[in-house]
Image (spheres, helix red, strand yellow):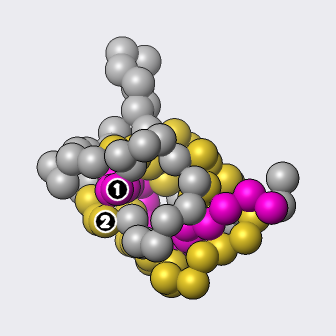
Amino acid sequence: MNFRPNFTGTLLMTANASSQNAALPSGGGSLLRVENAGANIAYCELGSDANMQALVPTANSGGGFPVFANQPALTVRLRAGDTRVACVSEGNSKVLFTRGDEI
């Protein structure tokens, strides 16, 4: 699958031990390219709730999907209504989110 970014920009989010929540870039697109430019695994959740939190998975609970550090970008298909992202990391990581479409 090839990814074509839209032209509304990229969201840069700093993930740390406290879950962060932000609006996704607007402009449409059914895909989200996620890239972790930090040194630690980040865990992300997608949804529409401004109070949503991402969790680090444990033996007793699930958590956000992992975005590994310094790996090729991960492409995620957005669900209808996904307008926000929450991220958490056990260290500091810079996570980039870009909306786009499949070509």
Dot 2 amino acid type: Ala
Q: Image quarter for residue 100?
A: bottom right
Residues at marks 1 and 2 touching, judged by CB atoms closer than 8 Å? yes
As helix, strand or loop, the secondary structure at mark 1 comes to: loop
User: Looking at the image, is 44 positioned above or below residue 39?
Assistant: above
39 with respect to 75 (left or right): left
Q: Main secondary structure of the magenta part?
A: strand
Number of marks in picture: 2
Q: Residue at x 47, y 41 (%)?
A: 79
Q: Earlier in the sequence, mark 1 or mark 2?
A: 2
Question: In the image, which residues are magenta?
Answer: 83-103
Tell me, yes or no, whether the highlighted magenta stretch contains residue 74: no
34 with respect to 88 (left or right): right
Q: Which residue is mark 1?
A: 83
| Near-viewer residue (57 or 48) | 48
Residue 28 shows in this picture: yes
- How far, Cα to Cα, is label 1 from label 2? 6 Å
| Near-viewer residue (90 or 6) | 6
As helix, strand or loop, the secondary structure at mark 2 comes to: strand
Q: Residue at x 49, y 82 (%)?
A: 8
Residue 69 shows in this picture: no
68 with respect to 86 (left or right): right
**Residue 22: x %, y % from top left:** 29, 65
Q: Image quarter for residue 45?
A: top left
User: Looking at the image, is 4 positioned above or below residue 52?
Assistant: below
Tell me, yes or no, whether the highlighted magenta stretch contains residue 101: yes
Q: Which mark is residue 23?
A: 2
